[in-house]
Amino acid sequence: MRFDGWIAGMGTSSRTRMVLGYWQRSPFGPFSDVMVERADGERLLLAPTRQTADFIRRTYTFDTVRVLPVDVSVTADTWTVTAGPLDLRFTVGRRGPLGLLLRTVPGALASRPAWCALTDWPARVLLAGVRTRGSAGQGRREWYAARDLRPIAGLSAAFEGEGLGVLARVEPPVRFGFGSVPPKPAVTRVTTRVALGPE
């Protein structure tokens, strides 16, 4: 199963970490979801339909799953996310050398599992906690092909009306699956492939 879109990973000074999936093409059509790890360690999934929620929770690990509208709008460099108890707004900055390098890799090559296997070690070295391939839930396998990278420059966020503080590194790493997002908040364009298990 192939998913094309963007993953935004960010932390806040309240030690809340968030991972937004903004999928423009997927087996379920366009959709967005948010994974939240709170300061107390609770791992929460906010997903727009029961179908997407079931697929994601079988692939990753959560303590709580909520099915509710997840709305994302992107205007220039500003992203606005509304997902039930979460209100999030962040801005992205200019891409750096790694983002420029990733944009030179042809899409047909970048999305191949063999390329993801080749880039797994460099990703581990350059971006602590990041993996480009690994085992997921239910015997599934995953491959992540990064095709662009831009830093997140600032955010404002609230959960159930309570402010989450200012932008911070994603520390400690999130614990939804076999890897985390980059420790420095960023938006990454990705092609993700998921091979289903015995299910």
Image (spheres, helix red, strand yellow):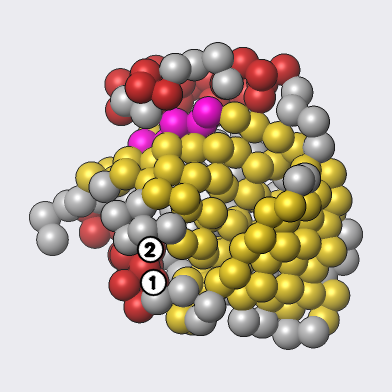
- Quarter placement of the C terminus: bottom left
Residue 102 in sight in this render: yes
Asked if residue 51 is among those painted magenta in the image, a careful observer would answer no
Q: Which SS class for mark 1?
A: helix
Q: Amino acid at mark 2?
A: Ile
In this rendering, would 163 be left or right of 64? right
In this rendering, would 80 be left or right of 102? right
Q: Residue at x 65, y 50 (%)?
A: 9
On the image, the x and y values in percent for residue 134 come to 36, 39
Q: Marks 2 and 1, how far apart in space? A: 5 Å
Q: Furthest residue to the bottom?
A: 160
Q: Which residue is mark 2?
A: 56
- Please, is residue 149 above or below residue 75 in the view? above
Q: Furthest residue to the left?
A: 198
Q: Which SS class for mark 2?
A: helix
Boundaries of the magenta span: 143-147
Quarter of the image holding residue 150?
A: top right
In this rendering, would 153 be left or right of 144? right
Q: Residue at x 49, y 38 (%)?
A: 190
Q: Which residue is mark 1?
A: 53
Asked if residue 146 is among those painted magenta in the image, a careful observer would answer yes
Q: Are marks 2 and 1 in contact (CB under 8 Å)?
A: yes
Q: Amino acid at mark 1?
A: Ala
For mark 2, does the 10 Å Cα neighbourhood hold few (<14), some (14 to 19), or many (20 or more) residues? some
On the image, the x and y values in percent for residue 90 come to 78, 55
Q: Main secondary structure of the magenta part?
A: strand
